[in-house]
Amino acid sequence: MNEIIQAMKQRRSIRKFKAQLPRKEDLSQIIEAGLYAASGRGQQAAMVLAITNKEMREKLAGANAKIGGWPDGFDPFYGAPAILVVLGNKACHTQLYDGSLMMGNMMLAAYSLGLGSIWIHRAKEEFEQDEWKKLLADLGVQGQWEGIGHCAVGYVEGEAPTAAPRKDNRVFWIE
């Protein structure tokens, strides 16, 4: 079987990570894979905010948990030490799709490098808040950006889950 298709079938969402930060070279490769995702009309309307700073990661986790309604101290990123936030340019009508494809590429790239990942939601709500908009402005990011998702990345703690059986009646051929 083709190794890319095999990776697509074997990659699973990870919900328990080791505290060890992945190598920056690996994170850079993951991000690069995301940057090569297909995009509507080739506009490349999505970007990545790579967070490896522990204090900023904890602040983001707290904001995410608050939006999700969880108690203080809950970690919605399951201990993953690196958070790659994907944001879509609101000026482009395909930003959600572009960002989603970027997320998929990055999760597959993480798997191919022996790392685990999971897509965590609520980035949209976070980046509607002034605090997170200010962070982008402080970084020199211009324009209006919508949070698409968080690609939480790290070394897998324990065994990765196996795939659930695929549901029937999801493909219909017209020949």
Image (tube, rainbow, N blue to C red):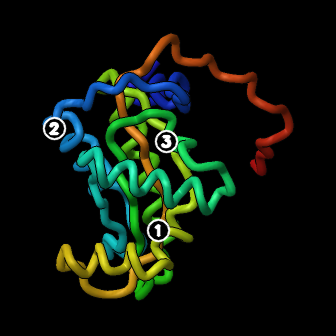
For label 1, the residue is 147
Inspect this view and state whether residue 89 appears. Answer: no
- For marks 3 and 1, the one nearer the N-term is 3
Dot 3 lies on which element? loop
Dot 2 lies on which element? helix
- For marks 2 and 1, the one nearer the N-term is 2
How far apart are the alpha carbons under marks 2 and 3? 19 Å
Circles 2 and 1 in contact, beta carbons < 8 Å: no
How far apart are the alpha carbons under marks 3 and 1? 16 Å
Give whichever of 18, 84 is nearer the camera. Answer: 18
Instruction: Kindly identify the residue that appears in the image at 20 percent across and 34 percent down.
Output: 26
Classed neighbour count for the residue bearing mark 1: other residues with Cα under 10 Å, few (<14), some (14–19), many (≥20) = many
Instruction: Give amino acid for label 2.
Output: Lys
Instruction: Kindly identify the residue that appears in the image at 25 percent across and 85 percent down.
Output: 142
**Location of residue 64 with respect to 3 vertically, above or below:** below
Classed neighbour count for the residue bearing mark 2: other residues with Cα under 10 Å, few (<14), some (14–19), many (≥20) = few
Instruction: Kindly identify the residue that appears in the image at 41 percent across and 88 percent down.
Output: 91
- Residue 10 position, x and y percent, is 52, 22
How far apart are the alpha carbons under marks 2 and 1? 23 Å
For label 2, the residue is 24
For label 3, the residue is 77
- Label tally: 3
Instruction: Kindly identify the residue that appears in the image at 55 percent across and 29 percent down.
Output: 15
